[in-house]
Image: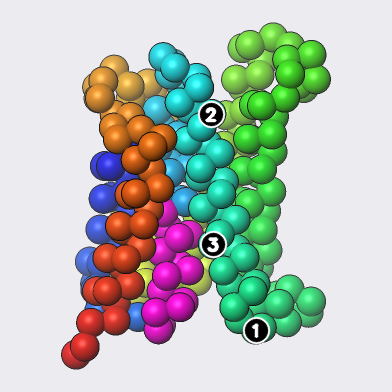
Amino acid sequence: MLLAFVAVFLVTFLAAPLLGAGWYWDAGNALGYAAGAGLLYLTAFGRGTADLRVHHRLGQYVLVVTLLHAFWFLLGDATVTVHLRSAAPAGLWLGVAGLLLQGALVTGALLPRRWRLSREHPAFRRWHRALALGAIVTAGWHVLDSGFYLPQPYQMLLLAAVAALAGWGRDWQRHWPGHVWPGPRGFPVIVALVVLLFVAVRNWPA
């Protein structure tokens, strides 16, 4: 899991590590990148997970971080609300779509089996993965459309490559048996640390 965070945040620092938009916007965007890293990890290693409870709990945490990212701006910047009420950029609506897809992912997995779209496990896994890939595409497009921390085209290509690797159907769990570290309990700690580091570097006095 830590590798997903390192890969995502490292790409944002490659070209302009000191580029920032003020601590408030940097913190909110860091939450978004953290949620994206969590989503990529869950998609890459969700197949064949030994303990589904860990997968479900991490999915809930990722959704909470995504909600924090969204409401951070809705409650703290009136410009975002104005955009949503008027002709908002396509990237903003794609972010909303990604949030809704993540909500469907978590809700669908937690529903009793008799209420799910399919009672058969293989069919459930297929639509669950389809929703995950949809969330990656919409959230990724949302990030690339903004591109504030990705001023160079190669950064966008690298981030797209990381997302593509996560969405690839291969079972990555066989190659990294300890991939879940530090687990659900450590996830909030990692998020807090990367957000603080992101904000500190972006707002470092020139």
- Residue at figure coordinates x 67%, y 58% from the top left: 96
Task: Check disc 3 and report the residue beneath it.
Answer: 69
Q: Earlier in the sequence, mark 3 or mark 2?
A: 2
Which label sits on residue 79? 1
Which label sits on residue 56? 2
**What segment carries the magenta color?**
21-34
Q: Secondary structure at mark 2?
A: helix
Position of 141 relative to 135 (above/below):
below
Look at label 2 and name its amino acid.
Answer: His
In the rendered image, which quarter contains the N terminus? top left
Position of 152 relative to 37 (above/below):
below
Which secondary structure type mostly characterizes the magenta part of the structure?
Answer: helix
Left or right: where 189 falls relative to 106: left
Which label sits on residue 155? none
Look at label 1 and name its amino acid.
Answer: Thr
Q: Secondary structure at mark 1?
A: helix
Instruction: Tell whether label 2 touches label 1 (CB within 8 Å).
Output: no
Instruction: Point out residue 164 in the picture as x, y percentages from the top left corner.
Output: 41, 42
Left or right: where 64 falls relative to 93: left
Residue 94 falls in image quadrant: bottom right
